[in-house]
Image (tube, rainbow, N blue to C red):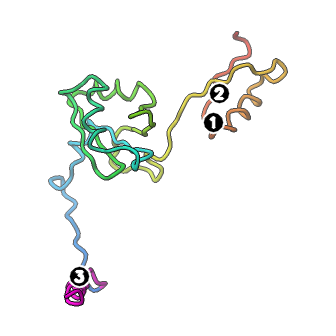
Amino acid sequence: MTSSLDKKLLELSLEEEDEPFDLPDLPEYSSSENNTMSLMGRLLNPECRKMANLISDMPRKWQIYDRVRGVALSSDIFQFIFKFEQDLEEILSRGVHTYNEWTMVIDRWVENPPPDYLRYLPVRVQIRNISVNNRTTKSIMTFGEFAGQVIEVAFDPMKA
């Protein structure tokens, strides 16, 4: 019985001679318009968090229960579709988001995401108690590079 099942499964596999199907590049086949009001996100530890719980809990956490809808796209990728631009912008402006004390990466949906989309999390780091002898932009940049890529150093030696 298992050999006949194996044969049937092998028959179902795609062979190289099978023709690929090309979906027409027409507006009616694109969901881009529906996605413009959405955020995409990725759980950084999907094995420790249930996607279904995140989808139901985040609107409550954000306090916009009836103005956003969540969709699980895979075990680690999700999408939240907003009714209002203002809600979407406010959620983005809050910075880093967590779910059950674990960080998640979120960003606005883009039609053609870059290869590193949802792969990095920009954070602001404040460094304190730098020695007076090391208060230069170059030394602060070097301290910051210890934590990761530095995009900007907000340091003005003329200000307290």
Q: Which residues are magenta?
A: 1-16
Q: Is 120 situated left or right of 9 in this image?
A: right
Indicate the position of residue 104 as horizontal and vertical percent values.
42, 39
Residue at (63, 40) in percent of width and height:
148
Q: Residue 84 vs residue 94: left or right?
A: left
- Eyeballing the image, is 83 above or below 113? above
x%, y% of residue 28? 14, 53
Q: Quadrant of residue 147?
A: top right
- Residue 6: which numbered mark, if any? none
Report, in whole angstroms, how far the alpha carbon at label 3 lies from the one at label 2: 58 Å
* SS of the residue under disc 2: loop
Whole-angstrom CA distance, mark 1 to mark 3, is: 51 Å
Q: Quadrant of the N terminus?
A: bottom left
Q: Which circle marks residue 150 in the picture? A: 1
Spot occupied by residue 140 in the image (x, y as percentages of width and height): 72, 28
- Predominant SS along the magenta part: helix
Amino acid type for the residue under numbered disc 1: Val
Q: Residue at x 23, y 27 (%)?
A: 84
The residue labelled by disc 3 is 9
Label 3: which secondary element: helix
154 and 61: which one is in front?
61
Mark nearer the viewer, 3 or 2: 3
